[in-house]
Image (cartoon, helix red, strand yellow):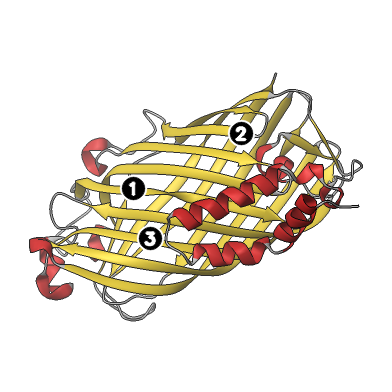
């Protein structure tokens, strides 16, 4: 016989996808924090109720509580600025990229709590004289159960160069250094969560953290949600002076601030062969973005847009009692409507991970 607390938990989890959708329509505040906390509590108590009791033939936990991991790869970031009113229309456009080379990372976990830090690998960047220098600080703290993944992150990129300058700088040629903007800073922070709708047979611990071992192949529907803030700022106008007349009647843009949410249903299939795995995950859904554009002399323009978002993740590797390794490819794209100005970021991550449990 279920008691009152168990009934509340089951109903809460059953309708959690609707709750997340409703929550993300709110601004980050007390209500958002309280409901996220409720979801966390339900997630960490999932093994207490028969509804979530795992099927032991599908996965098993490791006895080791601690793990360390090292990562290396490419985190490709680009900032595209356009004033076109249509996605395919011709217009002035500029593309900024960081000179980051290879990205290294380290992570330490206790049970299913993981703290990660990513940084530039010195000596792997392009020529500093030609492309400038980028400083990166990327922190992430995440907690995972079989039912729920929850992560908070803060990433900063300082220093960019203009990619494809021949398209936006008419007098530039390839013998010259690329136009550089050491004063431009990109900062993003937020929270994201993934809800597993098949926790009896599919484990997010195995799929995302390698802290459990999936024993049999299994398909699971998932729901992804996030709340994100990012801004691009500079000491002088973000738009180069020779292009300013094409944007906002020549007004100088010094900062943009975007914030909003996204909800994406998805599917994951974890294919298992002994201790080897292949795990594709696909998400697609909608988001909402509020945009503030800050100009010289305290002028501010505001926009609100809905947009379409996709995320594709593919991991492959080996997961055993004391050792795990893998390769990860992840691509994220935001299809934002262009209204006078669009600032769009695209992310492509290709990483290799090695880890040990103890």
Label 2: few (<14), some or many (≥20) within 10 Å?
A: some
**Residue closer to the observer: 174 or 328:** 328
Q: Pick out the residue farthest to the left.
A: 297
User: How far, Cα to Cα, is label 2 from label 1?
Assistant: 24 Å
* Quadrant hosting residue 18: bottom right
Q: Is residue 58 above or below residue 290?
A: above
Task: Tell me which label, 2 or 1, sits earlier in the chain.
Answer: 2
Residue receiving disc 3? 259
Dot 2 lies on which element?
Answer: strand
Q: Nearer the viewer, mark 3 or mark 1?
A: 3
Q: Is residue 194 above or below residue 92?
A: above
Dot 3 lies on which element?
Answer: strand
User: How far, Cα to Cα, is label 2 from label 3?
Assistant: 26 Å
Residue receiving disc 2? 113
Q: Position of residue 155 (x, y in %)?
A: 39, 43
Q: Quadrant of the C terminus?
A: top right
For residue 165, the mark is none
Dot 1 lies on which element?
Answer: strand
Q: Position of residue 269 (x, y in %)?
A: 76, 55
For residue 187, the mark is 1
Q: Position of residue 120 (x, y in %)?
A: 39, 33
Residue at 18% across / 62% down in the picture?
Answer: 239
């Amino acid at each position: 016989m279920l008691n009152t607390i168990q009934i509340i938990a089951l109903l809460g989890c059953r309708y959690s996808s609707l709750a997340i959708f409703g929550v993300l329509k709110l601004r980050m505040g007390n209500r958002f924090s309280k409901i996220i906390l409720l979801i966390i509590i339900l997630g960490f108590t999932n093994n207490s109720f028969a509804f979530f009791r795992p099927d032991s033939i599908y996965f098993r936990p490791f006895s080791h509580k601690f793990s360390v991991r090292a990562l290396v790869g490419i985190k490709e970031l680009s900032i595209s600025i356009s004033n076109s009113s249509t996605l395919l229309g011709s217009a002035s456009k500029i593309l900024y990229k960081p000179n980051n080379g290879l990205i290294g990372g380290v992570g330490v976990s206790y049970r299913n709590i993981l703290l990660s830090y990513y940084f530039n690998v010195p000596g792997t960047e392009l020529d500093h004289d030609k492309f400038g220098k980028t400083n990166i600080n990327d922190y992430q703290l995440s907690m995972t159960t079989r039912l729920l993944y929850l992560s908070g992150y803060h990433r900063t990129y300082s220093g960019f160069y203009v990619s494809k300058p021949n398209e936006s700088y008419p007098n530039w040629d390839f013998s010259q250094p690329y136009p550089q903007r050491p004063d431009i800073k990109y900062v993003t922070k937020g929270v994201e969560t993934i809800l597993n709708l098949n926790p009896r047979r599919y484990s997010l611990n195995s799929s995302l953290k390698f802290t459990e071992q999936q024993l049999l192949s299994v398909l699971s529907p998932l729901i992804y949600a996030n709340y994100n803030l990012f801004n691009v700022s500079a000491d002088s106008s973000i738009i180069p002076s020779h292009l300013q007349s094409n944007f906002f009647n020549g007004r100088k843009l010094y900062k943009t601030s975007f914030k909003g949410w996204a909800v994406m249903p998805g599917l994951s299939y974890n294919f298992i062969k002994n201790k080897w795995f292949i795990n594709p995950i696909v998400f697609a859904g909608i988001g909402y973005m509020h945009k503030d554009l800050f100009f010289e002399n305290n002028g501010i323009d505001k926009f609100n847009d809905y947009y379409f978002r996709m995320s594709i993740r593919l991991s492959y590797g080996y997961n055993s009692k004391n050792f795990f390794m893998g390769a990860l490819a992840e691509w994220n794209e935001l299809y934002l409507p262009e209204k006078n100005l669009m600032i769009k970021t695209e992310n492509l991550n290709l990483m290799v991970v090695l880890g040990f449990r103890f």
